Image: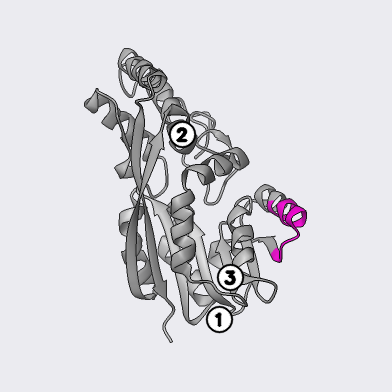
Amino acid sequence: MATPGSDGTAGAPPAGETGDTTTLIGRPADRYLDEAADHLAAVKDEILRRLRVRPGHRVLDVGCGNGTDALELARHVGDAGEVVGVDVSEEAVAGAIGRGLAAGAGVSFQVASVYALPFPDASFDACRSERMVQHLEDPVAGVREMLRVTKPGGRILVADPDHGMWAPDLADRETTRAVLAWWFDNVRNPWIGRRLPGVLRAAGARDVHVTVMPVVLRGVAAADGLTGLMDALRHAGDAGVVPAERARALREEAARRDADGGFVMYGAIALAEGRRPE
């Protein structure tokens, strides 16, 4: 998500172009992705478990960002395997290449679109994507391309948040609902989490299964780092989405609860998995 108002349109956070990760939730992508990794450790562990990668596997990470997840996958496929990460952002791929070189891992990165993956059919034993499909104009086409490069019988796993499920502990329910709906409606597919099983089936996946993983963000810093909550409250008040004084009161309430160690925000990420038909 780009910084609200950065497109010159007053009062609304613009929906970025597909795959534009220069900024996410109003901050540099690298910083956002590192913060998110800390808060989503349990989700990432479950993705890895369900992907069932083994030594010798060849695995594709679509929307690899800064390469952290691809490097973890490389540990599991071992020297006999291979991990490839792709992202549409040249900046992200350059950073991922640097991390890979520093780690000395058997992983490669390249710039590519999910709609046109530069690999032959049936190139990978498994394919993963995390928090990428929410930004796609055509999720089914993107997942269909991921299935194309997966071997028959190979596993595909797509994980995305459902932005309709974020629940910060704030007293003013009406204002909180209005702010969150406005803020996350600027994600291209804000409710993609609940749609993922249907997306995988429409793309041609078989044996589709979905697991919903809870996300618990303890403290304002965690909530702001992953969702941009405080930015949302500030920009919504400035833009007149909600009365400025009510938005300010919510920010102050969050800060008070945070100081007392009592602020929490809940959410959910859907993990949808399936197989390419034999």
Q: Residue at x 43, y 87 (%)?
A: 278
Mark 2 vs mark 3: in front: 2
Residue 99: x and y in percent read 71, 52
> Which residue is farthest bottom?
278
Amino acid at circle 2: Ala
Going 37% across and 19% down the picture, which residue do you hit?
A: 260
Q: Main secondary structure of the magenta part?
A: helix
Asked if residue 240 lies in the magenta stretch, the reply is: no
Identify residue for label 1. 122
Residue at the spot of label 3: 59
Can you tell which quarter of the image residue 220 is in? top left
Tell which circle, 2 or 3, labels the residue nearer the N-terminal end: 3
Q: Amino acid at mark 1?
A: Ala
Q: Position of residue 70 (x, y in %)?
A: 61, 60
Point out the residue furthest to the front here.
261
Q: Would you identify the image quadrant in which residue 183 lies?
A: top left
Determine the image quadrant of residue 211. Answer: bottom left
Q: Secondary structure at mark 3?
A: strand
The span from disc 1 to disc 2 (Cα, nearest Å) is 39 Å
Q: How many marks?
A: 3
- Disc 3 marks a residue whose amino acid type is Val
Q: Earlier in the sequence, mark 1 or mark 2?
A: 1
**Span shown in magenta:** 96-107
